[in-house]
Amino acid sequence: MPGARVTAGSLALAFVFSTALRAEDVAPPCSFIMDPGNTPIVDPRLDHLIVDGVHVNVLLPPGYGRGERRYPVLYLFHGAFSDEDSFTTQTDLMAFTAQLDPHQQVIAVMPDGGHLPAGRDWVDGTHPQESFVIGTLIPWIDSHYRSFGDRSHRAAAGFSAGGMNALVFAARHPDLFGAAGSFSGFVNPIDPVGIAVVQQFAGLDNELCGASYDWLALWGDPVLHPMGWEGHDPAFLAKGLEDVSVYVASGNGVPCPENPDPDPFLIFAESVVFQMSLELDQALTDARVRHVTDFQSCGVHLFSNARASYRRCFGLGVGLDLHR
């Protein structure tokens, strides 16, 4: 595939394939492409950490410093060209969690992510993404914070491919997660459009961020080695979510009244993930997996979708309900 031509549209398309897993250092302006004003926030509730070389933010409940109470843990996976600060700078996560009732409070863990995350370790062995989250980060959090430390009080959620990662982790490790949420998720990448997006992202990473990756290094050749793709596809792995409470949210690509003239690629991107979310809904239904869908009547592919989704998700008491 020819190298990607860098346009405003192609940058907007970058939202389609997003997450927060194994960190790569991102030098400006790459780290600010998607997240204007993404300057780290200094706040007593927010711990800025480095775990096994990966930048991780941990947002604590307002009353964490008082008493010995234990809390559920919510892992949040962000978007491409974003980092561990994105959920706190691009959404109202800090203000929203501050006003939750005490029985709704959680520890929110936000790891930095690579430019081309995959939901699993890369097949070429260069990016142990799943190994870091499952084998290193979760045990580290449970040993350093007052978490419950069990699956019924642990959830994963994310925006775009962060939603893919959340569902893949939960499907592959249902012993670790009781709930998973996808916010405009890239949740059926085996689709031909999904394959094209992965190729596009390899080009964007190389051109914008100075990388030199072959897109086949992530999951292998989708024709010759389909198992590498199936193993990170939430729709394909739907049966593995049968014991997980699942929340699936998406806009449909139609601009909302408050954003009447968005970048056309933001429209395209959300229409792609909307179709993927519909396919995931059907796969979950066929697998008899309990889940809640939250499909909106409008919405393009913006990080603000994650803000709206986690607000609705908490309000519905499903998907991220870790207080049962």
Image (cartoon, rainbow, N blue to C red):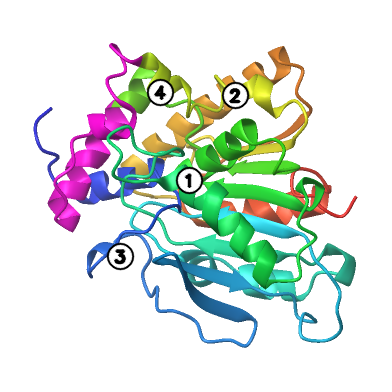
Q: In the image, what residue occupies the spot 24% across and 62% down?
A: 30
Marked residue nearer the N-terminal end (4 or 1) = 1
Give the side of residue 230 with respect to residue 69, left or right. Answer: left
Q: Residues within 10 Å of mark 3 (few under 14, many from 20)?
A: many
- Amino acid type assigned to the residue bearing label 1 in the image: Ser
The numbered mark at residue 229 is 4
User: Percent from the top left, x then y, of residue 10?
Assistant: 24, 44
- Cα distance, mark 1 to mark 2? 25 Å
Which residue in the protein does label 2 denote?
Answer: 280
Q: Residues within 10 Å of mark 1 (few under 14, many from 20)?
A: some
The numbered mark at residue 31 is 3
Magenta portion: prevailing SS class: helix
Of 197 and 114, the residue lying toward us:
114
Q: In the image, what residue occupies the spot 89% across and 65% down?
A: 103
- Amino acid type assigned to the residue bearing label 2 in the image: Leu
Marked residue nearer the N-terminal end (1 or 2) = 1
User: Percent from the top left, x then y, of residue 273?
Assistant: 48, 33
Q: In the image, what residue occupies the spot 47% across and 29% down?
A: 232
Position above or below: 184 against 260: above
Image quadrant in which the N terminus is located:
top left
Which residue in the protein does label 1 denote?
Answer: 131
Q: Nearer the viewer, mark 4 or mark 3?
A: 4
Position above or below: 280 against 258: above
- State the SS at label 4: helix
Q: Are marks 4 and 1 in contact (CB under 8 Å)?
A: no
- Amino acid type assigned to the residue bearing label 4 in the image: Trp
